[in-house]
Amino acid sequence: MSRDDQRLKELANRLVAMAPEPPPFPEEQITLSTQTPQSRPRPALAFVGAALLVLVGAAIPLVLLNSNGSDPVATTAPPAPGTTDAPATTQAPGTTQPGTDSTEPTQTTEPTALATFTTSVFLVQDPENSFTGNPALVAFWTEIEAPENTVQQLVPLQLLMRDDLELPTPGYYNAIPSEVEFLGLGWDGSAIVIEVNEAFRRGAGGLLADITMLNQIVYTVTYMSDIESVRFLIDGQDVTDFGSDGLDLTGGVTRETFRDSLNSVLVTEPIYVGDGLPTVTGVANVFEATVSLEIVDADGAVLYQDFTTATCGTGCWGEYSFALDTPALEPGSLVRVFWNSAEDGSLSDVVYIPFAERAVWNLIPRQ
């Protein structure tokens, strides 16, 4: 062996002694999420490249084989600190998750705040000595409790949905069938729009009953509004086939639309009792526009009489108003409004209005 060969052998032995331990078996490996930057090899170590190749070749089998001589075991890097990888859950097809019994207290909803509304509703009356047989409308003040965020015009309609109203006298009735429901109310700029249920479409049974029902709704809902027209929707669509005659209500209904199907004397304002004199106000289409009024007691004795001239009459509708300057108007008395027949002066189309304390009627049964 030459001197150079001897030096090469010694150098190889030194390199073997300096070589690191071979890496652990694959099942003992820990994969790190960071990498050490590579450095460029120094020129002074280039002469040992051949020897390093021999050593690397010897170490490779240790990295690639495990103790069983199989492929290396795959490893997964641990999740980042503060995170967890929850195992995915699967649900077998056709099965449902079992119900769970919650130990948390049941969530309760705050009760809706109620407010007291003073409002006006129109009730229907069959007048005495009617020439046409048409019903009359009379307005009454009443109070009702409803959720405070209820649209004010919807409150009296919700009252008229009840089938247990305490009516002022036996001569009054509600022309709206109990199956009818008023589901919502809004405005389209020119009309009040009421969403109703399907039972509304059937009407009240007969043409006159259908029209009376419409008049009662329209007079009631427009009393506290500057808008005069009312549209009716079912599932968002205009009602085009209402009642027994299939009336088309698309264009809206006003107080004037079917007014000729009402009594010739109407009371369109509740009796007002305020700082001034009590008043009785309405519209009439009577002979020579002359409207008469009387106050009678419980026995029918006349306590007070008056008459006035409407703004139009004998074939046209006009407005009238009475200011009652008398102590005769008190709870238990009756106001009756009518016109006198041109033939014999008899009382015609007589409307009776009972008077209550403060002129406010409790139309809801007392609990």
Image (cartoon, helix red, strand yellow):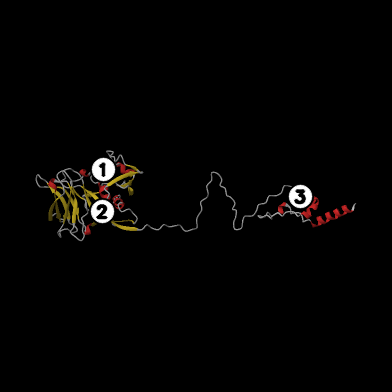
Look at the image and tell me whether residue 367 can be seen. Answer: no
Q: Residue 149: x and y, percent?
A: 35, 55
List the residue tagged with mark 1: 210
Give the number of the disc on residue 60.
Answer: 3
Task: Judge depth for marks 1 and 2 and give the one in front.
Answer: 2
Give the number of the disc on residue 303.
Answer: none
Q: Quadrant of the C terminus?
A: bottom left
CA–CA distance in space, label 1 to label 3? 100 Å
Asked whether the beta carbons under mark 1 and mark 3 sit within 8 Å of each other, the answer is no
Q: In the drawing, does residue 177 fall left or right of residue 102?
A: left
Q: Residue 304: x and y, percent?
A: 13, 56
Q: Which residue lies furthest to the left in this view?
A: 344
Pick whichever, 276 or 40, lies toward us: 40
Pick whichever, 225 or 243, lies toward us: 225
CA–CA distance in space, label 1 to label 2? 22 Å
List the residue tagged with mark 2: 120
- Ranked by sequence position, the earlier of labels 1 and 2 is 2
Dot 2: element: strand
Query: How many residues crowd mark 2 within 10 Å: few (<14), some (14–19), many (20+)?
Result: many
Q: Which residue lies furthest to the front in this view?
A: 43
- Amino acid type shown at disc 3: Ile
- Ranked by sequence position, the earlier of labels 1 and 3 is 3
Pick whichever, 188 or 138, lies toward us: 188
CA–CA distance in space, label 2 to label 3? 99 Å
Task: Judge depth for marks 1 and 3 and give the one in front.
Answer: 3
